[in-house]
Amino acid sequence: MKVLVTGGTGYIGSHTCIQMIASGVTPVILDNLYNSKALVLDRIEEVTGTRPEFYQGDIRDSAILETIFAQHRIDAVIHFAGLKAVGESVEKPLMYYENNVAGTLNLVQAMERAGVTRLIFSSSATVYGDPASVPIRENFPTSATNPYGRSKLMVEECLSDFHKANPEWSITLLRYFNPVGAHKSGRLGEDPQGIPNNLLPFVAQVAVGRREKLGVFGNDYPTPDGTGVRDYIHVVDLADGHLAALNKVSQKAGLHIFNLGTGHGNSVLEMVAAFEQAAQKPIPYQILPRRPGDIAECWADPSYAEQQLGWKAQRSLQEMVEDTWRWQEMNPQGYQD
Ligand code: NAD
Ligand code: WQD
């Protein structure tokens, strides 16, 4: 099976390509390298022995999509390419709608022309907005609290309408919770540019000495220790979830929606304590006011994915923090030649 992987040099895409290669699926990557480096291809080759075919280009460029579909017999598309910084999306909403929404429409149009009718899309738990209760099931109401989230929701809605008109397609929406961790080798991981927006990359940079201390955004939430609770999932488990979707549902016509999470929530302070244990050093932190737009608790009910895909997250919190730390310690400045 050959799969076009948009955004394949990014954090989740690169780990998914590794799991694909290991299971005999051939990835063809399209990425404009806006938020990733070509060095990732060397690292994928290093750990798998296979260098994925790579096109440097943009999902908004119809010509490059046509070239790829003409040069390869693509069976399915896994669509990771997108911008994902919530704060930036508030500052530059049009950039997010243009890249994430218009980019996806362009990709689907190119697929239609090429007769490729199987799509797996990277959605997010952010489409649940501030959920009325946890754990969150796939049939919970959706809403958005910022342009990034709205771009994901818009794509979900566009794809759902498109599927109604084209029921022979297989479209899978995977709603990720909080991906963390890194490849066991320590050669691939998350490499945010600038100040990390997400918790674990920030903690890792404090541990490695790149930042002085963590700011904990609020300790007055209605949670056991007052800090925010999230469903952290190891990126390799998430990658395996894509393979399960590819093998189990992407052959079947339909609009398929799955939560990819562990079903467990951990607080910010629990994550800090787990990381301190892994790195064997204290992580200095300071309690700051709540971050605007944050919610108290968010964790998945992943039972539908288990039932339908035969997939379940396997890796423990300890593995998540140990693998993150190995990656950060071996690559203190991220990907560098
Ligand atoms: P990432 O930034 O590491 O990877 C995205 C990749 O897409 C990057 O390599 C970037 O260069 C590429 N890209 C962006 N716009 C492009 C375009 N127009 N054309 C071609 N390539 C383009 O992010 P990630 O964490 O790997 O996330 C992958 C996907 O999963 C994104 O769509 C993101 O919104 C979604 N997601 C991420 C998280 C998370 O916390 N990491 C959670 C839920 C959903
Ligand atoms: C986790 C917890 C923070 C940083 C975001 C996006 C969401 C999805 C995943 C893509 C919260 C706290 C964080 C820090 C902190 N992305 N925190 N200090 O907010 O669940 O989700 O990433 O789809 O759309 O909104 O993840 O890692 O930013 O925060 O105290 O420096 O850590 O308040 O409780 P979040 P996060």
Image (cartoon, rainbow, N blue to C red):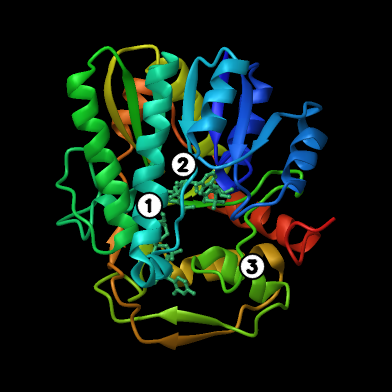
User: What is the secondary structure assignment of the residue under circle 2?
Assistant: loop
Q: What is the distance, in whole Å, between disc 1 and disc 2 at their CAs?
A: 9 Å
* Residues at discs 3 and 2 in contact (Cβ within 8 Å): no
> In which quadrant of the rendered view does residue 122 lie?
top left
The answer to which image quadrant residue 111 occupies is top left
Q: Is mark 2 within 8 Å of ligand 1?
A: yes
Question: Looking at the picture, which amino acid does disc 1 mark?
Answer: Glu
Q: Label 3: which residue?
A: 204
Q: Residue at x 29, y 42 (%)?
A: 155
- Residue underneath mark 1: 98
Three-letter residue code for mark 3: Ala
Q: Which residue does the image show at 52% across and 29% down from the upper left?
A: 65
Q: How many neighbours does mark 3 have within 10 angstroms: few (below 14), some (14-19), or many (20 or more)?
A: many
Determine the quadrant in which ligand 2 lies: bottom left
Q: Which secondary structure, mark 3?
A: helix
**Is 174 situated above or below 99?**
above
Q: Residues within 10 Å of mark 1 (few under 14, many from 20)?
A: some
Earlier residue among tags 1 and 2: 2
| Residue marked by disc 2 | 60
- Using the image, determine if residue 105 lies above or below residue 37: above
Q: Residue 256 vs residue 310: left or right? A: left
Q: CA distance from mark 3 to mark 1?
A: 32 Å
Is ligand 1 within 8 Å of the beta carbon of the residue shown at mark 1? no
Which is more N-terminal, label 1 or label 3? Answer: 1
Camera sees residue 314: no
- Which residue is at the front of the view, 276 or 248? 248
Inter-mark Cα distance, 3 to 2: 34 Å
Q: Does residue 235 lie above or below 110 as drawn?
A: below
User: Which label sits in the foreground, 3 or 1?
Assistant: 1
Q: Position of residue 296 (x, y in %)?
A: 28, 68
